[in-house]
Image (cartoon, rainbow, N blue to C red):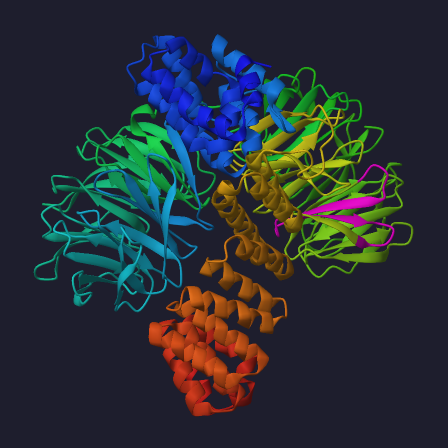
Amino acid sequence: MTDFSDRLKNLSPEKRRSALDTLPGDLVNTAQTARLHQLLTDFDFIQAKLAEFGVQALIEDYNLAIKSDVLLNLEQRETLELIAGALRRSAHVLEEDTTQLAGQLWGRLLSFDRPEIVALLEQAKQKQEKPWFRPLAANLTPPGGPLIRTLTGHSDSVNAVAITPDGKQAVSGSDDKTLKLWDLATGSELATLRGHSDWVWAVAITPDGKQTVSASDDKTLRLWDLATGSELATLRGHSSVVNAVAITPDGKQAVSASWDKTLKLWDLGTGSELGSLTGHSDDVNAVAITPDGKQAISASDDTTLKLWDLATWSEVATLTGHSSGVSAVAITPDGKQAISASDDTTLKRWDLATGAEVATFRGHSDDVNAVAITPDGKQAISASDDTTLKLWDLATGAEVATFRGHSDEVNAVAITPDGKQAVSASVDKTLKLWNLERGSVLASLTGHRSLVNAVAITPDGKQAVSASDDTTIKLWDLDRGSVRVSLSGHSKEIWAVAITPDGKQAVSASLDKTLKLWDLATGLELATLRGHGKGVSAVAITPDGKQAVSASGDNTLKLWDLATGLEVTSFRGHSSPVLAVAITPDGKQAVSASVDKTLKLWDLATGLERASLTGHSDSVWAVAITPDGKQAVSASWDNTLKLWDLANGSELATLTGHSFWIRAVAITPDGKQALSVSDDTTLKLWDLATGSELATLRGHSSSVLAVAITPSGKQALSASLDETLKLWDLLTGRIVATFGGEVGFKSCAMKPDGVTVVAGDTSGGVHFLRLEMDAPLASPCEGSENPLSLLSEGLSLVQQGREEEAMSCWEKAVKLRPDAASMIWGNGGKALYKQGKALWEAENYEGAVRCFQGAVKVQPDNAEYWNYLAASQYNSGDAEAALSSYETALKLQPDDANIWDNRGYAFHILGRYEEAIASYQKALELDSNYANAYYNIACLYGLQGDVDLAVQNLQRAISLDSRYRKMAKTDQDFERIRGDSRFRALLGE
């Protein structure tokens, strides 16, 4: 134990906190360079400060040391910059889970051989208190490159971003219907602006930085006060989605662009519409205003841009040249040129005086969604569906740099006023802050160039094989996490790979219609197996290693002789693509799973179909066979699993519980249990003897795509699109360890030792991790006397759906340190709310109720928590409880139309129609254009058979949002009036 750790251990909680808070500053002020450098490279200090004060306070210690006059030498300063950079890049992970500190540092710093870094990582390995995943090779973007930090908080795609004129803050807009205000120096969320009833497509900030204007799918624009977060005005006039907005240089007016094919000019002082610009023949996607405020340029799906005179509202010119919709446009600071971005994957530079195309910029491989120009007018940065941003030299048209880091389409980008940084917004729900001056510094991490669909480990545990959409196979040294050889030969995506039992060969399956046999010792291609008429989706090898069975989109399976590479037989019987195949342990039979909703049992010796297993109502995605070969478990997009008797093909049980597609299933080595993973964010453990659900493992926040069970059968590894890998204890249902990556994980495998992991991600990365755990896990909260540790344990328990145990941890923490109650309850409430939202979206309303009940217990003054609790209660069948929760929410936030509308629906469910209508009408008093309230009133009158009032209110709802017409066509509330001619006419029938 280091001297610092000893000192901390012997201090009282108050003195410990004070020391962690003030010591770095004291060392800077007294110019104790050696001690300062030693402190900031000491893992004990880093871990303690993180637990006590959070990651931003820790980063500020490094900033203080680096920027101070303390005489650090160049090597010391660079070392501290590396550690600070690693912490900054992992801040969004460490804010959620401090137990990942060691894993994040190893993942980002392992490639640096500086003595202080090597010592820090070794100390982290020895001192990390919780079980954790240790990267065997650098697998996270290291510091020193363009990515500065990741901003998390939105719960859906982030569509827009704008930066304040002082460069200190950013505003984002999202599909979660909110705007968020961010501090760019710390990455912290300052405020959430709520008011839109649908997706937010665009944001713009006034030149004085005091207000922002947002544009939404709800057909409105809204003006907000950034100091208070309050809505100042709602601008109505568009008849369809408003997806762009720009503000004039004087801040007095705004121009909006809409799917109604028009642009509108607005007075921001009064909120009134000044005029409408028509001329485009399709959706208008973007608008920009010249620096003198006299003209605007718009971009449309009609493939053109148009230049407009804002004084006369007339069209000045039409710019043609793109071959597909134009999604974005930006104007150079001198107002002479414009840069457009298009779905044709290019950007174009235009001369605004002549309307002529000056240059075309090529480099993106998918739709280009956004473009921003640096303040000096010399460079532009673009954002694309290909998940990258690109920096361009406007004078030469050359690509200067490519920024990689997002795991999904990049929707928007904005540049800071000094031109040094950019903020991007993505479908992956994050924003990222980039250093534009470091675009070409960073080298790519070793791996594939695209999605890793499958990973497999040789039986001796020494090698791993990965298969990717980039058409290659890679062979890895498992102990070092290094590439031995890259195998090329396929011409299309590789979906599957299997290794022979002797570990000497591998078979890959590709969309190029072939399989390939590889020698793992030499990396040579031994044979190409041809015969399928469409892509090959799966492959399995017989236990003797002599044959392989493949499954294809051509509706067939084929048996291959691996010694000769020849096709032995073809299995025909499925009527749709075959997605999966498994072979029985005796090697005599195979089970296939298909889009045709069936499984089929095949005799490998004769090629005959022995049985067709029917019962699923949607595509069967996966199948696994028990170790004794007597049963099979199938997983389907009908949200169920089925257990089958392979002796007679009969269905033994249907396993129900998942609320969305099931992606994979694995069976424990003893054959007694099965573990499934689903798009509903959960894993479920099943008893195969009874068909009953044993446990639901909660903790992921997005689709879980893959699972692997340890050889002991006691633990399992899951891979999720939420960018995490999780190891679970199957006896307790607890999360043992989590590793946070930078993109979603697609595939995973476990070495025979049960502690070494291989995982493939959606951007091509292959991760090699080892579980470091010296002792069994203690019971929740047991033995801990550190309030911050108890908070962290509680957050972990929330992720597992163990809300009551989490509350016990937090209550114990408050008893230990009452002054920390505010911080503990705040973080705890947020964690419960976040988990509740995930369960809500997965339609697990009972679980959501438990989470939101915990959230309101720890933060009883949060109206949004009460609102979600109520909605979860009535969706789980308890409308009376929902009413009580809505009353509490309205006491806290009486002017929220959404809560009044939701309260009305609770009355609606209970059959208390007059009270329901009164509540809906209150919502309309607060927002006269609240379409859902009109629709709900129409439903009530429909139930009562009052055609006049039903049609009147439904017509109003449809005029505000045409989607209600489609809803009304199938809504049972209108059955009594469905035959009325007025109702049918309104629906267009």
Residue farthest along the right direction in this orientation? 647
| Residue 36, above or below 660 | above
Quadrant (top left, top right, bottom left, bottom right) of the N terminus = top right
| Residue 595, above or below 464 | below
Instruction: Count every numbered label the image shows and give the total.
Output: 0
Q: Is residue 494 visible?
A: no
Of 876 and 323, which appears nearest the observer?
876
Q: Which residues are magenta?
A: 668-692
Q: Position of residue 315 (x, y in %)?
A: 13, 59
Of 521 and 789, which appears nearest the observer?
789
Of 125 and 284, which appears nearest the observer?
125
Q: Is residue 681 visible?
A: yes
Picture quadrant of residue 330: top left
Picture quadrant of residue 881: bottom right
Q: Position of residue 684 (x, y in %)?
A: 72, 49
Q: Based on the picture, tell me whether residue 911 belongs to the magenta stretch.
A: no
Q: Position of residue 379 (x, y in %)?
A: 23, 32
Query: In the rendered view, does 612 fall on the left or right side of 166?
Result: right
Picture quadrant of residue 852: bottom right
Query: In the rendered view, does 985 fall on the left or right side of 104?
Result: left
Q: Position of residue 162 (x, y in %)?
A: 28, 45
| Residue 183, above or below 25 | below
Query: In the rendered view, does 196 fall on the left or right side of 816?
Result: left
Q: Based on the picture, tell me whether residue 691 belongs to the magenta stretch.
A: yes
Query: In the rendered view, does 544 fall on the left or right side of 572?
Result: right
